[in-house]
Amino acid sequence: MFGLFKKFKDGFAKTVSAIAAKTAAIFGAKPIDASSLETLEEALYTADFGVETTEEILTEIKAAYKKDKTLHGQEAAKIGAAVLKRVLAGSEGSLDVTTKPANPVVIAMIGVNGSGKTTTSAKLAWKLKQEGKTVTLAACDTFRAAAVEQLKSWATRLELEIVASHTGADSAAVAFDGWQAAKSRGRDFLIVDTAGRLHTKVNLMEELAKIRRVLQKNDPTAPQHRWLVVDGSLGSNSIEQAKVFHDSFGLTGIVVTKLDGTSRGGALVGIYRQLKIPIYFLGLGEKAEDLQPFSVDNYVKAIFGIE
């Protein structure tokens, strides 16, 4: 657990430093004051926690400060952490890996190009494999020239099973073949890496709908999971992106990537507040093991610098 928390803390280093650089007095042992509260407010907005969450955190800290003018920074941090935990209650996604499914459980990975969708698909497959599950990857982003080769490269490196075709192939046909292969081999999971951009948003949504229809010819319940992969560095802009995909495809989960390189690590709070879609994983680095299950407790502790 300590190692996992360290991964979170390291992954959120930029967000933490963006806050802590301005709020050393708040999160330290000294009593807080009105000036340090203003600094905290600025830091929370900078990290993209949004108006609602920032105001809730500040309201409770100010109330405590009003009662006790000797309120120390460490105590203020704990109050802020408690508020954030309350806001994120129910946000941890949990993937059932304990039972052997009758058919492959399909996870459709959705998102725009550049979100880290393809690499996340490979990392997720590797993670499930490490947990003793059998997994097939389906390279259905056939519209981006490098996507199929990128996923093949990850599959080779991590020794993962993959079903792929050539660039420009029918992505729904690849999804169909992927499901058939996973079923015939008795695999637990099929991870479908979908296209991130076509000529228009309408075309993209139609392609995703087609993949879903084709998968349902094999299994009416597929894809059981429809996860949006969002680039954490987009900050609050990722909320609108999530809304569009949710309206069109009915998302069941979120994966937030690239959080190790951004000072805007508060954006995932806004996504959850708006859509109430569980967050399953966070991308905290380039390595396969840097895809980590989302933990509210570890996230909150890392943000507020609580050991």
Image (cartoon, helix red, strand yellow):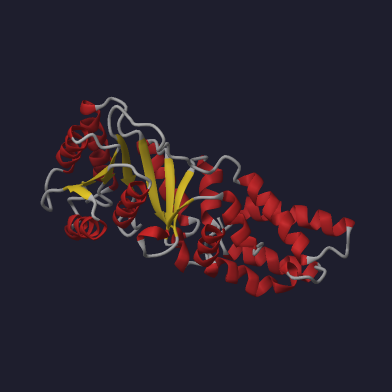
Residue in view at x 55 percent, y 59 percent: 5
Residue 55 in view in this figure:
no
Furthest residue in direction front, as rendered = 132
Q: Which of the 4 image quarters holds residue 31?
A: bottom right
Q: Nearer the viewer, residue 159 or 190?
A: 159
Q: Nearer the viewer, residue 186 or 196?
A: 186
Q: Which of the 4 image quarters holds residue 302?
A: bottom right
- Where residue 14 appears, x then y in whole percent? 53, 69
- Where residue 227 appears, x then y in whole percent? 38, 43
- Where residue 157 appears, x then y in whole percent? 24, 61
- Where residue 99 appears, x then y in whole percent? 39, 32
Q: Which of the 4 image quarters holds residue 244?
A: top left
Residue in view at x 70 percent, y 69 percent: 39
Residue 277 in view in this figure:
yes
- Is the C terminus in the top left, top right, bottom left or bottom right quadrant? bottom right
Up the image or down, 232 lies above or below 89; here it is below
